[in-house]
Amino acid sequence: MADETEEMESSTKTKKSSEESESSSKTKKSSEETESTTKTKSTKGSDEEGGEEKGGEEKGGDMTAKDHFHKQHYKLWVDDAWCKEGDTMKFEVHLNKEADHNIKVYYQTYSGTAKGGKDYHPEKHYVTIEKGEDSAYIYIDTKDDHKKEYKEYFYVKIDEHDPYVKVKDYYGKGWIHDNDGHKHHEHYEHNADVWMG
């Protein structure tokens, strides 16, 4: 009878020990799975953040590259011009190729032997070379003074301009021909001094 009791107690202890072991194993496994899930989530979050940052850098780089190559670089110059006094003088502003965007060119008149307000109307303005065009005109009105005189000149000077433009020649020289019967000298004095108009 005592042997039977001992055997039952031993069996109970073994069963209890087995249950505890199984419970411990389940707890450990659950803990490992939780840790693994946390690591995976953390890694995924890190990858996503890195991806966003990388994507932002690439996007920014692409935009900069497009902006850099979108607008072309141009050379600009202004021609000399002439007209009879009292007429409108027309200076042509040129680009070396067609514009891929509207280009504003600012200009101002300066006196030479012809004086602003007396021989022509002084101006400080701008002209636009339209997209698809390679030139535009600056118009300056001259005055008829009804006096016999030699040819006179003034200047149009390019001031501010588009950052994608390099100016080859800033000055256009405008010759006013007398219309009152005076004989003109045909020599053009390109190196004359410039005064403010």
Image: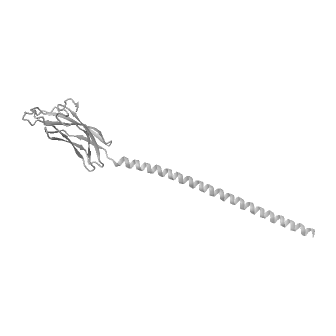
13 left or right of 39 in image? right
Quadrant in which the C terminus appears? top left
Residue name at image x 81 percent, y 66 percent: 15
36 left or right of 109 in image? right
The image shows residue 109 at horizontal and vertical percentages of 23, 36
41 and 125: which one is in front?
125
The answer to whether 45 is drawn above or below residue 93 in the figure is below
Residue name at image x 71 percent, y 58 percent: 28
The residue at the far right in this view is 1
The image shows residue 38 at horizontal and vertical percentages of 63, 56
Q: Quadrant of residue 179?
A: top left
The answer to whether 9 is drawn above or below residue 93 in the figure is below
3 and 76: which one is in front?
76
Residue name at image x 86 percent, y 65 percent: 10
The image shows residue 18 at horizontal and vertical percentages of 78, 64
150 and 77: which one is in front?
150
The image shows residue 157 at horizontal and vertical percentages of 24, 36
The answer to whether 169 is drawn above or below residue 37 in the figure is above
The residue at the far top in this view is 193
